[in-house]
Image: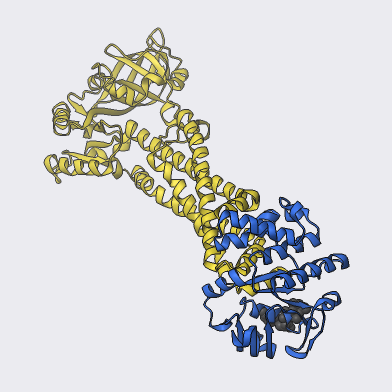
Amino acid sequence: MIKFLLRGLLRDRHRSLLPFLVTLIGVMLTVVFHAWMTGVIGNSIEFSARFASGHVKVMTRAYSENAAQAPNDLALIGTDTLTAGLSERWPEMEFAGRIHFAGIIDAPDSLGETREQGPAMGFGIDLLSGNMAEAERMNIPSSLRSGRLPERKNEVLISRLFADKLGVVPGDVITLVGSSMYGELAMHNFTVSGTVDFGTTALDRGTVIADIGDVRDALNMEDAAGEILGFFRTGVYDAERASAICEEFNRAYNTPDDEFSPLMTSLSQDKTMGFLVEYSGKLQAILVALFIMAMSLILWNAGLLGGLRRYSEFGMRLAIGESKGHVYRTMMMESLLIGFFGSAAGVAFGMIISLFLQNHGIDLGVMMKNASVMMPSVFRAHITPATWYVGFIPGLISSQIGSMLSGIGIYKRQTAQLFKELEQ
Amino acid sequence: MEDGKVISIEGLKKHFPMGSGRFTALNGIDLAFGEGEFTGIIGPSGSGKTTLLNIIGTLDNPSEGRAVILGHSVSELTPAESASLRKTQLGFIFQTYNLFQVHTVYENVEFPLLLQGIANNRRRQMVLDALEWVGLTDKINSRPAQLSGGESQRVAIARAMVKRPAVVLADEPTANLDAANSHNILQTMEKLNRELKTTFLFATHDEKVIGYVRRKIWLADGMVARDELIEKN
Ligand SMILES: Nc1ncnc2c1ncn2[C@@H]1O[C@H](COP(=O)(O)OP(=O)(O)OP(=O)(O)O)[C@@H](O)[C@H]1O
Ligand SMILES: [Mg+2]
């Protein structure tokens, strides 16, 4: 009997190939979409964490309220002790102070007169301590286009577009004109050690990156930093743990009435990132639900069409003495089989594509040329354990639902009626 | 079985819902069929032939009255019981053959035995015997699409007969066949009827079929108009 059904399944392409292909394509798309979305969301979160928000971030409340303006007059002080304390208390995280600053970069000619100048956004990060963690985090080694990383005091990296605009090359001296922590005019000379290209318009337009020590000197920010970022050593953001750490830190360090006392926030508290973090958790559920619905509908209709073609067969099998329940169950078995192989093939193809997208990534930089948001330009898919079943199980379920729905019609019909319909 | 009858029908009515009212397709049928009958149910289109055969074949239920098949009252059978009765005792032949298109001649004839769970060796012998009865041993591996109409109907006969049922119900079996093929399959069925004592009931208005049957029952407007025994030897 099983052989009889298998033969029918293999010989009748409408019975097997069509639903097989539908399942395959649906599962494949789901797998690729899942890996891609997980990757894109992860890339965006990671990018934002590395460049802006950290997994957790300590600022004064006053600073955080105006963070976009890099108000260094509201910066944290005593950050060396604070950073050390944080690292001791939460060894699972790595902490590093950063200074954001805004100013004018002035490129002088040989006589010291202004040749070109332009507005700049600056990062003061740890570059000279010998610990490369911060440089790696900001992708600096791989973003270097010319020259080298700063190795001595008062060396600076400058984004390539900006360097071209100013007409400076590694070795040239540039002057930062900014405001000190106390609101006074601050001027400081840096030597360009290299140029970088992040591939992100928001960063490439006008960025300078210097060692945090030099920036402190330049802006008179002794033992101060705009923010201290914390990163999980695992490299993976853990929303629950992060919020627990924040709570614990704020209980110990934050005085609610004092707007200059340190306040820790997590990545999830950032509006956009918080949405993405939450969304990425729900993504799977949404995807699976959509998939099952769409695929069930398609397979239901494919099953109905297939079922219509098989009225004569079903009617005859009933007349020969097969029970309706048995006919129905064999239909379900057939679709389980097709669903299994279709889903397996879909996972296989989907994984191959996802793997390719994970290893190679897609450069969407062109599309975001003028985007002012800080987003990575190259996105990569990311395969997680869920990628394996997010398509497979729904593939099975929807092929079952599909044939269940289409089978009901046959189940409900009077046997005699099946023949009537096929006589016409 | 009542009075040694294979089938007995009393006061059988069948109504179909139609619009707000109902349509009476069978309007009080009393009939009995014995073992080994070769009977034609004859009548114009719409007279109720198919409806009667469907009820005898347990594919449909009476609205009123009784139809007792091999000792079982059709209206009292559960779906499982009627399926089991069809599986072992009833064979069907249709105008449109209704062969399983993706299966070979052999597999088509084998199916009723698979359903009964008959063991391999015995099953094979029974299938070959049945194909021999209808003269198709050389077409064992053909698919229905490769067969002529006459050959297809012979496969259908083999499939109906392979389990040696007590009753075969044939609804317009010759309607799609030419004269030569019609005579051929009628002779085949007549031979099986004599050798195996199988009861054959035909629903037909084909003169050729009427020429073979030994009992003619005329239906008109859902009632028996005439019931005539033909003496043959
Ligand atoms: N399911 C149904 N619903 C409504 N009316 C039906 C149904 N089945 C049969 N009828 C009606 O019952 C009457 C008898 O139908 P039946 O199929 O038994 O006729 P028949 O003698 O087999 O005719 P034919 O020679 O055309 O096959 C017809 O008028 C038909 O329209
Ligand atoms: Mg009819």
Chain letter matching colour yellow: A
Displayed-image quarter of ligand 1: bottom right
Residue drawn at the location 52% of the way across and 38% of the way down: A349
Front residue of A309/B203: it is B203
**Which corner quadrant holds the C terminus of chain B?**
bottom right
Counting from the top left corner in percent of width and height, residue B41 is at 76, 82
In the rendered image, is residue B64 in sight? no
Q: Say which colour chain B has.
A: blue
Residue closest to the far right: B179
Residue drawn at the location 28% of the way across and 23% of the way down: A133
Residue drawn at the location 30% of the way across and 44% of the way down: A268
In the rendered image, is residue B224 in sight? yes
Front residue of A373/B43: it is B43
Locate residue B199 relative to residue A44 in the image: left or right.
Answer: right
Counting from the top left corner in percent of width and height, residue A116 is at 43, 18
Q: Total of numbered circles in the picture?
A: 0
